[in-house]
Amino acid sequence: MKHEMEIDGVEVTFSEGETILEVAQRHQKEIPTLCYDARLEPFGGCRLCIVDLEGARTPVASCTTQATAGMVVKTATETIEAYRKTLLEMVVSENREVDVDALRGYAAGELANLRDRYAVHTPGITGETSGTIKADDNPFILRDYELCISCYRCVRVCAEQEGDHAITVMNRGFDTQITTEFDGLLKDSACTFCGQCIHTCPTGALADKKALRHAEDTTQPRVAAPLPDIEKTRTICPYCGVGCSVDMLTKAGQIVGIHPAMDGPANQGALCVKGQFAYDFVHHPDRLKTPLVRGDDGELCEATWDDALDRAAEGFRKAHATYGRHSIYGIASGRAPSEAAYLMQKFIRAGFGTNYIDNCSRA
Amino acid sequence: MSNPLIDMQKPDVIFCIGTNMTECHPVAATGLKKAVARGAKLIVADPRRIGLADMSHLYLPLRVGSDTALLLGMAHVIAREGLMDEAFIATRTVGFDDFFEHISEWTPEWAETITGVPAKDIETAAIWYGSADKGAIYYTLGITEHICGVENVQSLCNLALMTGNVGREGTGINPMRGQNNIQGAGDSGALPNNYPGFQAVTEPENQEKFAAAYGREIDMEKGITKVTALELCGAELHAMLIDGENTLLSDPHRVHCEHALRSLAHLVVIDIFLTETAQLADVVLPATAWGETDGVCTNTERRVQRLRAAVPPAGEAKPDWWIICQIAQRLGFKGFDFDSPKPIFNELCRLSPIYAGLDWERIEKGEYQWPVPHKAHPGTPRLHEEEFINGRGVFSNVHYRDPAETISAAFPVWLTTGRRLQSYHTRTQTGRAQGIDYLLSEESLEVNPADIEKWQLANGEWCKMSSARGSITIKVKATNRSPRGTVFASFSFGDVPVNLLTGSGYDPVTHTAELKVCPVRLEPL
């Protein structure tokens, strides 16, 4: 049988194992989701992705329903859209703080975006809210569970993507609370502070504490507009050799946070504690800001670039003249870009005609 | 790595040896965790009961420095049980008959006497790996930082060759590189034996090529390694240019290293901080950091990717390439009039066959894994698919050797060293990132609780640790991660300079230091 089905009146093909949601997304259908993260197993918890499936008694969750030949699916009938709006009203009613600072995390604006799309501005339903903030003195992950909508994305990303199983759920129903084993601190759990939970959270309940130091109004870190003055630059993590792609968030010449690059070829959105949080060495006051040369008193003192470079060159010239070209050695860095390593070897080879060059890989 | 990172999710049997991946390459480890969740079997060989060991199906707690013996024992069992891939051996390898005879001697019972791993576990590991449809090997410095690093790697190659676990999805021999651009530094020719792209300096045609490109004759003889260079400082070597390396803390035998650098008439260090090494320099030149520098890096799976600048330099800091060009120009060297990193990278691509199909524009999205021999080439995620670079895979008849130093009455404890999840290398960067201290604020020596009692130490108290080269004081931490008789510390903290103790020996071929083995003595303070 051919892998063909109909979505909103159009004949489309699918591959074995694809869900209705995946097929629809490939055809630019904007089906709303909250509990969905493309990297994780489908969960079917939020029910926002429901679609009308011909022959089915009730709407089906498109994220958990596999495409089969001959299916006839409508993604946005009036009834379906009305259901979605009602579902969103209920979610928003449980979570009064929908507008969160985008510095909270990669997906923190998802709920707010859906609220706007479905015009759920004044909650039609009022009632109790759920979840309580967990006091946790760790410097990286804010646990603001008042914003939690129990989509379980954090639980699942920690288990499925990171393999740490540090996040769990306690209680049931309306009292459901995301927490760690024995309801303790993250530090005392299996958490490795990779930050994946922050960046899958669709409401900012789990948030990047370190980035929030740069929020506009730190007394009210929840309320802010979505990052008008923050730029994103794609680069590669500066630590180990895995080469994870990251988006560096910058504001007024400062790095204010890191987002994992979900399409990073080496990491597909995964990061570790170093790549996620250890970026601010760049702005540390210890950074060398001017050249230094050793004075007659034996101390290193500040110098102009011209003087320092003259002095650097002079030392090599002297060694060359006195001891010959095999008296000079270069050690290139495994931390600097390839252009630096390439020029280091060229400096030695083109300059002195030797192979007296190495890098730091032997120790 | 012979195989791409994405392959880590695909093996049936995973053999990790000498790699603490969940701490040192955490994101790569997520691939293995997914494979295990899918049903793959995980074998972990490591002296310490590391995180990977806890999730393994078979843990082989070998004595530090005994890897070759373990791997010979495994090869013996694979041969004895007839688990070889005969077709692969016949068409893709040479030297198997000799190797078959060689390993007949090295039984798992013999390996047990060297490694301390029960013979039956060595047998199980060999049978699992040998029976796998897709068996993959992962290793890190626990294999290479030994005097027998070359033999260790050759032993792993032997296992992969005899079982045909090379050149296919989910297989391979996969070393995990430890620094963001350590692969790129080698690719770029910062090696005493190779021009860019691993072109041997001893080949006349390579010499001609670079003489033409650089406008001068270059020695046909290999240069000396950094290890040899440090030995010759003050004698034959008098000037040194170091770019971005804290040699003093990261290298073994710190006293020797410091003495070497102080013996130079002229030391120039380019770095982003005034590191312990920079403090010894005559001239310190401030470089732009990550986030401030445009450039290229190559990861452990040979993927060539762009680094992008997004913030202005700190103070007057300048990119490394600019600094090197300025020194070169002052010395009258030709070919250093660059005004941006792009033409530098493009020059590297023109001179390097493995990068020949690349240029600055083509690596924009990081899609290419080298070799990329020409512009129409899609890159090479998986090496050795059709044939090996040198034709056929060669079996190596390796022998086990003891470490350079073995435990004695004076130094009765094995010290092994490494990294931890929360700190990186000598903490020049992670030590200056806010919050990291909350997770890890000081170094401690991991000691088995029973040993703490036996050696009259106390958990949380300081002790004196000495080797043949020196002594340090370090806080004791009781943990079952350390087996009886073996202790562990990282080299990250400047106030606990573990590399004062290390430096017992070097691999004679690669000159890689035996940082993973150092007999020590522990005394209460």
Image (cartoon, coloured by chain):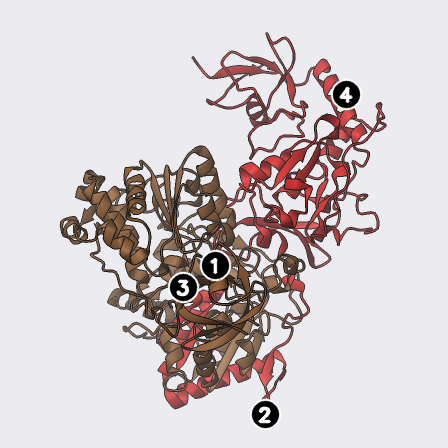
Q: Tell me where residue A255 sits by quadrant.
A: bottom right
| Disc 2: which residue | A296
Q: Residues within 10 Å of mark 3 (few under 14, many from 20)?
A: many
Q: Helix or strand or loop: what does disc 1 sit on?
A: helix
Q: Which of label 3 and label 1 is nearer to you?
A: 1
Per the rendering, the colour in which chain B appears is brown
User: Label 3 sits on what residue type?
Assistant: Lys
| Disc 1: which residue | B450
Residue at point 42%, 59% (across, down): B484
| Disc 3: which residue | B516
Residue at point 60%, 86% (across, down): A299
Mark number, residue A86: 4
Q: Which of label 2 and label 1 is nearer to you?
A: 1
**Same subunit under labels 1 and 4?**
no
Q: Residues within 10 Å of mark 2 (few under 14, many from 20)?
A: few
Q: Which chain's residue wears label 1? A: B
Per the rendering, the colour in which chain A appears is red
- The answer to which of A131 and B412 lies nearer the viewer is B412
